[in-house]
Image: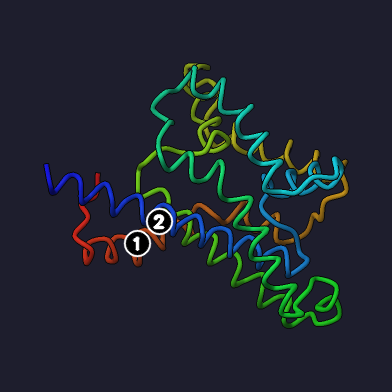
């Protein structure tokens, strides 16, 4: 029992760390000015349109989205889902506040393409590592991430997960465009290249790391 309790505690610590890493990566993408992942893109646009902060908006929207997801797929519920639902938006806002306090802003970097490209690359890599670590913890998934799985399941696999996810991401991008969010190469890169990069980090970085920490893969 002690071993299981220690394993759970370690996974909770790692899932919080993973969301902090994700927040940092998304902040780098925002700073690059090349666009963020489709879901954040949509949330940034809508929250700005409504005049509320990203953190608060994501809490509200995730809670609304969580209700049908939980009813249809209770396995998606867990501590990891809660950390992502209620923490990630605020983590992003906190990082952007720190960067602005240090005098590093999107507007200030607008004319420096080399630094912006470096931030884009770094942001994609950091986001993918955060996702790989978050997924490994296996403590539940955010509602948006589970929605594609639910669509595939309830359509009896007539609608495959990848097509459901693409449709969701395209819808998010469309909402982002309509609400004035930044759409760019970063949005496209994250939408199409996340899978392979996450798989790479899982095998080459996350699994070796957790083995050193004594955490068993589920």
- In the displayed structure, 110 sits above or below 144; it is below
Residue at position x 27%, y 61% in the image: 210
Judged left or right of residue 31, residue 63 is left
Q: Quadrant of residue 159?
A: top right
Q: Which mark is residue 196?
A: none
Q: Nearer the viewer, residue 125 or 163?
A: 125
Which of the 4 quarters of the picture holds residue 163? top right
In what quadrant of the picture does the C terminus appear?
A: top left
**Closer to the N terminus: mark 1 or mark 2?**
2
Give the percent coordinates (x, y) of residue 97.
Answer: 70, 66
Locate residue 137 relative to residue 176 in the image: left or right. left
Residue bearing mark 2: 133
Whole-percent x and y of residue 32? Answer: 73, 70
Colour mode of the rendering: rainbow
SS for callout 2? helix
* Residue 172, image x, y percentages: 73, 39
- Place residue 209 in its image quadrant: bottom left
Q: Quadrant of the N terminus?
A: top left
Could you tell me if the residues under marks 1 and 2 are in contact, i.e. CB atoms within 8 Å? yes
Rendered residue at 56%/22% (across/down): 67
- Up-down relation of residue 153 to residue 143 (above or below): above
Q: Give the residue drawn at x 69%, y 73%.
A: 99
* Circle 1: element type: helix
Q: Residue shown at 73%/69% (left/top)?
A: 31
**Mark 1 = which residue?**
206
Task: Compare residues 19 and 42 and report the one nearer the observer.
Answer: 19
Q: Nearer the viewer, residue 187 or 67?
A: 67
């Amino acid at each position: 029992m002690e071993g299981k309790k220690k394993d759970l505690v370690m996974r909770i610590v790692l899932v919080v760390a993973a969301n902090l890493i994700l927040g940092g990566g998304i902040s780098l993408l925002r700073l690059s000015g090349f666009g963020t992942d489709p879901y954040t893109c949509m949330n940034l646009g809508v929250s700005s349109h409504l005049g509320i902060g990203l953190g608060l908006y994501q809490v509200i929207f995730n809670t609304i989205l969580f209700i049908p997801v939980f009813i249809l797929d209770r396995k998606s519920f867990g501590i990891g889902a809660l950390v992502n639902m209620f923490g990630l938006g605020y983590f992003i806002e906190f990082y952007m506040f720190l960067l602005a306090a240090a005098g590093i802003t999107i507007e200030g970097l607008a004319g420096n393409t080399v630094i912006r490209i470096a931030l884009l690359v770094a942001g994609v890599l950091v986001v993918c590592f955060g996702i790989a670590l978050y997924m490994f913890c296996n403590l539940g998934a955010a509602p948006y991430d589970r929605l594609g799985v639910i669509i595939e399941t309830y359509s009896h696999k007539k609608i495959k997960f990848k097509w459901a996810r693409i449709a969701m991401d395209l819808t998010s991008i469309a909402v982002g465009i309509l609400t004035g969010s930044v759409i760019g190469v970063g949005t496209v890169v994250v939408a199409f290249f996340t899978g392979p990069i996450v798989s790479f980090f899982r095998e080459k970085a996350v699994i070796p790391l957790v083995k050193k920490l004594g955490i068993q893969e589920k």
